[in-house]
Amino acid sequence: MPSPQACDAGATILVAEDDVLVRIAIAEYLRACGFRVIEASGGLEAKTVLQHGPEIHVLFADARLAGDDNSFALAQWTRRYRPKISVILNANLPKKSEAAAHLCARNQPNPPPASHLRERIKAMKASHTHRAKADRRPKAAYR
């Protein structure tokens, strides 16, 4: 897990997640715990932030990022060129929410439980799926 100073209030966490709903929910959760959060939609964008952006303390990445800048390549690059940055890789929703809750617990005495984050993500995905289905319904003819 990240070093204690990486979890100080105001520390900057880079969340690299290709699922926009998961990324938004995790970023909101971490912001509510007092962290500054930068979001990246993939490995290439995260690497660009690491190279040219503000100081990052923790890289919180989806272990399933695809492409040449996949999560493992991103983690290796980070450990080699930015060794002070703590790297957290998780592949599934329960692990991601537990890792986010663990970070919050080191920064906040009574953080919202990981189950709240999981339920928020599930609700966001259900709402998105419902809207997508509604958008595919045939439109009524104009009269």
Image: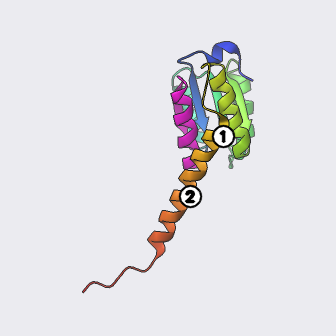
| Residue picked out by circle 2 | 126
Q: Name the quadrant of the N terminus.
A: top right
Q: Name the quadrant of the C terminus.
A: bottom left
Residue 21's disc is none
Q: Quadrant of residue 61?
A: top right
Residue 22 part of the magenta-drawn span: yes
Q: Is residue 82 visible?
A: yes
State the residue in front, 79 or 38.
38
Vertical placement of residue 86 versus 74, above or below:
above
SS for dot 1: helix
Vertical placement of residue 63 versus 12, above or below:
below
Q: Quadrant of residue 73?
A: top right
Residue 4 in picture, x, y percent from top left = 68, 14
| Residue picked out by circle 1 | 115
Amino acid tagged 2: Ala
Vertical placement of residue 5 versus 134, above or below:
above
Amino acid tagged 1: Ser
Total marks shown come to 2
**Apparent side of residue 86 relative to residue 38 in the rendered image (left or right):** right
For the residue carrying disc 1, how many other residues have a C-alpha within 10 Å: few (<14), some (14-19), or many (20+)? few
Q: Residue at x 56, y 19 (%)?
A: 11
State the residue in front, 77 or 6.
6
Residue 21 in picture, x, y percent from top left = 55, 48
Q: Residue at x 57, y 42 (%)?
A: 23
**First to last magenta residue range:** 19-41
Q: Residue at x 73, y 39 (%)?
A: 95
